[in-house]
Amino acid sequence: MSSGHIHKIEKFKSRLLRTERDLIVYLPPGYDQQPHRRFPVLYLQDGQNLFDGSTSFIPGKYWRVGETADHLIGTGAIQPLIIVGIYNSGKRRVREYTPTRSGRLGGGKADRYMRMIIEELRPFIESHYRVLLGAWHTGFGGSSLGGLLTLYAGLRYPHVFGQLAALSASVWWDRGWVLRFAAHAEVHPRPRIWLDIGTREGPRIVPGVEQFRDVLCSKGWSLGRDLHFEIIEGGEHNEEAWAHRVGPFLQFLFPASETPV
C-alpha cells in the first residue's frame, strides 16, 4: 500500500500572532501522480501530537494520523485529502484555543488565532498545494481545548469550515460559554460535525457534551446525517484514546462516496 508524503514547514510567520509555529502537511498517496487533481483539506490543532511520536506531548503516544489516512485512502474508505497539522505554541495554547477569558485560567484570544488561520495560513496552503476550495471541502479539528476551538470555529465561520472533528471538546470552559454561544448563533450553512467524549474523562464532562449535542439538534442538526455523537465507553483524555477515533471521524467527514469528480 502506498503512503502519503509529509512536508514540514518550520517557523511559519504571522503578522497577527507573536509566535512562529511549525506546520506538518500530509499529502495523500498519488498526489504527485495526479497533477491536475485538487483535494479537500483538514486543519488539525496540536500538530506535534498527530504524526510523530517523538514530538508528541507524551513521547510515543500520538494520533497516528498519517498511517490511518494512508490505510483508509488505500482501501477506498475515504477521499484522498490534504491534512495540515498546526503546532501549538506551548504556553500560549490556552490563550489561542479559547474564545473567552475565564478567570485565573486566562484565555480569550481565539478570534485572533482564527484570523491567522483564515487570513494567513489558509491562503498559504491554497497557494502551495492543490486544495479544493469551499467550506464543504475544508475541515477543522482538534481535541480538548482544540475541540472547543473547533466548535467555535465552525459556528463562527461556517462559510469557511464545513467539516468539524471535535474530540473530547472542553465545552465546560468559562461556565459553558460555548453552549450559550451555540444556542444563539446564526449558522449557515450548517457544517457537518463529529462530536465525541469518553466516559473516563471526568464525571461532569459527559453531560456537558450531551447538552451541546442537544443544542445542535434543536438548531436543525440531525444525528447520523450531519451530526455524529458518540460516548466512548472507557475513553480517556489523551492522545492514545484520540488515535482510535481518527479513522471513524475521517470516514464520517470525508467519505469516499463524496469524492469530487
Image: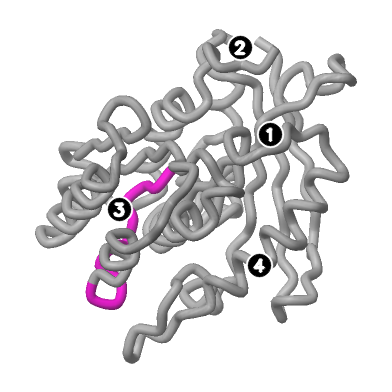
Q: Position of residue 86 (x, y in %)?
A: 64, 55
Indicate yes or no whether the magenta region holds residue 199. Answer: no
Circle 4: residue type: Arg
Alpha carbons under labels 3 and 2: distance apart: 29 Å
Q: Residue at point 83% right, 37% down?
A: 129
Q: CA distance from mark 3 to mark 4?
A: 28 Å
Boundaries of the magenta span: 165-175
State the residue at coordinates (39%, 48%). 166
Give the side of residue 100 with respect to residue 24, left or right. Answer: left
Q: Label 4: which residue?
A: 115
| Residue linked to disc 2 | 74
Q: Residues within 10 Å of mark 1 (few under 14, many from 20)?
A: many
Under circle 4, the secondary element is helix
Q: Nearest the camera: 190 or 107?
A: 190
In x, y percent, where is residue 52? Answer: 60, 44
Which of labels 2 and 1 is toward the front? 1
When the figure is inspected, residue 54 is found, relative to residue 119, above or below; the finding is: above
Badge 2 or badge 4: first in the primary sequence = 2
Q: Which residue is mark 1?
A: 82
Looking at marks 3 and 1 on the same chain, the residue that comes earlier in the sequence is marked by 1
**Mark 2: amino acid:** Gly
Alpha carbon of mark 2 to alpha carbon of mark 4: how far? 34 Å
